[in-house]
Amino acid sequence: MTALLLGITMGLGVGILWWWAGYPAWTVPTHRSRLRDLLADAGLASWTPTRLLVACGVFALLAATVMFAISQSPVIAVMAGALVAASPIAWVRHLQRRRQAALRRVWPDAIDHLASGVRAGLSLPEALGQLGEGGPEELRSAFVSFSSDYRSSGSFSVSLELLKVRLADPVGDRVVETLRLAREVGGSELGRLMRTLASFLRDESRVRGELESRQSWTVNAARLAVAAPWVLLVLLATRPDAVAAYNTTAGVVVLLTGACVSLLAYRLMMRIGRLPVEERVLR
């Protein structure tokens, strides 16, 4: 019976994943806009919040099925599914942090390249187009698309707005708005302004890197402290007497209390060690 249930659930999970990967983008309600912004900041703009939520459900279902096959306990299975359900969102947040860190490192070089182009006499659209050929690898595709947009529309403002959407980065927002203002107001100080911004971003990246290296022990300690009791629960789930204890009302209370305490302690430790996150105020 367990093998049959496991096979049916695995098949259902594979079917949902296939359907999720191939289904066209959906229109999602406004209350999911934070998930859409998270996906865009992580470089996954082609995803939709609906697909991310479906992935959470699939992971929860698979985890619950595996734990039920191991322990024969619906209580432990449900708890495992609930704990694993947020793993796709955590993965997307990891991609977001990694992408923002990578862009933070390459933006000073891109701005220097842009300032050199302006100093050499190129127009702003031409200097931005040069970044698609000789700029940092992480930014080239966005600036290649900018060149294509500008050639097709002829509107610098519209092309900048599309560039901002593709970059989905706080530093990119600042650069785009600076270029928009320079285009509209004019002036001969754009090169100096770009070099000053590049110097500021280098200093900011260096300081933030030092802080993140010192913060890493707090983050790792929080994750280890949260994961340890649940790893122990998985080991105990292989013992019938322990499973029988958790199937009682008292066992359910213990599991729920442990989950709440673990979540609260993790959030508290992460908040204490959290560094300020630059928001996209110029979105």
Image (cartoon, rainbow, N blue to C red):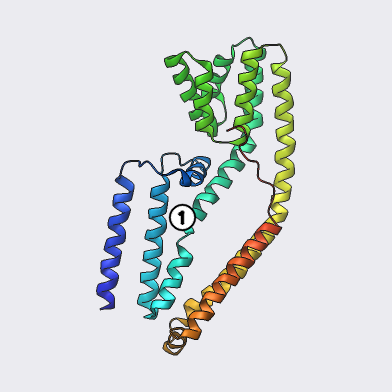
* Nearer to me, 252 or 236: 252
State the residue position of label 1.
Answer: 88
Query: In which quadrant will I find the N terminus?
Result: bottom left
Residue at 65% x, 23% y is 178
Question: Can you tell which quarter of the image residue 217 is in?
Answer: bottom right
As drawn, the residue found furthest toward the front would be 30
**Residue 144, how many percent across, how many down?**
48, 24
Locate residue 52 relative to residue 7 in the image: left or right. Answer: right
Question: Can you tell which quarter of the image residue 227 is in?
Answer: bottom right
* Nearer to me, 258 or 220: 258
Mark 1, Cα crowd under 10 Å, few <14 / some 14-19 / many 20+, is some
- Under circle 1, the secondary element is helix
Query: In which quadrant will I find the C terminus?
Result: top right
Locate residue 67 relative to residue 205 in the image: left or right. Answer: left
**Is 249 above or below relative to 175?**
below
* Nearer to me, 130 or 166: 166
Amino acid type indicated by mark 1: Pro
Residue at 65% x, 45% y is 277
* Nearer to me, 140 or 73: 73
Locate residue 247 relative to residue 169 in the image: left or right. Answer: left
**Is 146 above or below relative to 123?**
below
**Residue 138, how many percent across, how many down?**
54, 34
Residue at 44% x, 90% y is 241
Locate residue 208 relative to residue 255 in the image: left or right. Answer: right
**Is 93 above or below relative to 166?**
below
**Residue 148, how many percent across, how many down?**
44, 20
As drawn, the residue found furthest toward the bottom would be 241
**Is 37 above or below relative to 148?**
below
Residue at 56% x, 75% y is 258
